[in-house]
Image (cartoon, grey):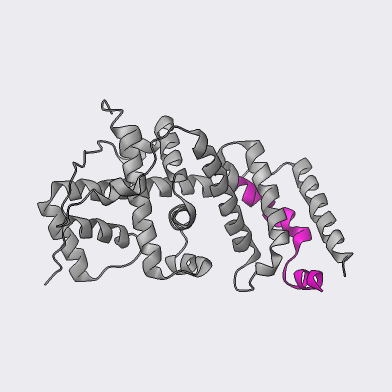
Amino acid sequence: MFWVFNCKEVTEKISLSLDKKLSFSQTMGIKFHLMMCKLCARYHNQVFIIHELTKLQSEMENHGNQNITLSTDMKNAINIKITDHLEANSNLI
Amino acid sequence: MKDNRIKKQLNPEKWVDLYGDYLFRYALFRVNNKNIAEDIVQETFLSALKASDNFKFKSTEKTWLTSILRFKIIDHFRQKGKENTIIADNENKIDKLFNKKGKWNVDVPEWRFSAQELFEKKEFMNVFNLCISKLKGKTAYVFHSRELDGEKTETICKDLKITATNCWVMLHRARQNIRYCLEKNWFDKKEEF
């Protein structure tokens, strides 16, 4: 047995399947609907493209550019501000 | 008193050395501008100092700082989005995608390219990022955390104090909005693609 979904419900389940493991009957319900419905099949494909694009984007961010660093000047400037803030607050005690 | 507590739990003196580069790369990748990324990192540290009472031992310093940075980046995009003429997501239109029986009211045109092919088109990725920037408030935060940072939904729900169902509904909304935005701002306009 599997779920019978309409298009609106299928689009909700497609999204959910990216965040949570669906039950077997739900997964079959989606598959069955996608076989019959061209528009939902396209929608499914598009949501997965969006998902894939965000993954490609964050992979590049995590594994690319390891040599890109905050400049020493900027680091010093921020550290000065942090120290100032800490000192200003400790004076209040 | 207050400062003693900060010193026990957090080490702001070490933040820049420990997390500065990481946060900078994170910001730079999203905003694509060195000066803006530097500003955002600086603002993140300063906001963190002011909000140090909100720090919970459960999360690490790095996660906590990253979540503040994320809000700063979203703010930046919301400002930038105001200056852009991109066709915005429209909740009403999305509600009208389906009829009362839950069937499509509109056509869903085919996208003829794979994710990899689209990823390689700079112009497309620009539209893609603008579409993400059009997401609002918590929906934006949930989408960024889940899709771009790969955070678990449970963690996101806890951060925002919302239920898992609420979180999933927001993610669905976000995906619908981005799909709609890409269709209007890219696929409808670039029929040759």
Give the residue at x 75% y 43%.
Answer: A74
Residue B54, percent from left and from top: 65, 68
In the image, residue B27 above or below residue A26: above
Is B177 a magenta residue? no
| Magenta stretch, residue numbers | B1-25
- Please identify the quarter of the rendering in which residue A65 is found: top right
Residue A50, percent from left and from top: 35, 46
In the image, residue B113 above or below residue A23: above
Residue B77, percent from left and from top: 53, 43
In the image, residue B1 above or below residue B167: below
Q: Is residue B24 left or right of residue A79?
A: left
Residue B152 visible, this angle: yes
- Please identify the quarter of the rendering in which residue B53 is found: bottom right
Residue B8, percent from left and from top: 76, 73
Give the residue at x 56% y 47%.
Answer: B75
Q: Main secondary structure of the magenta part?
A: helix
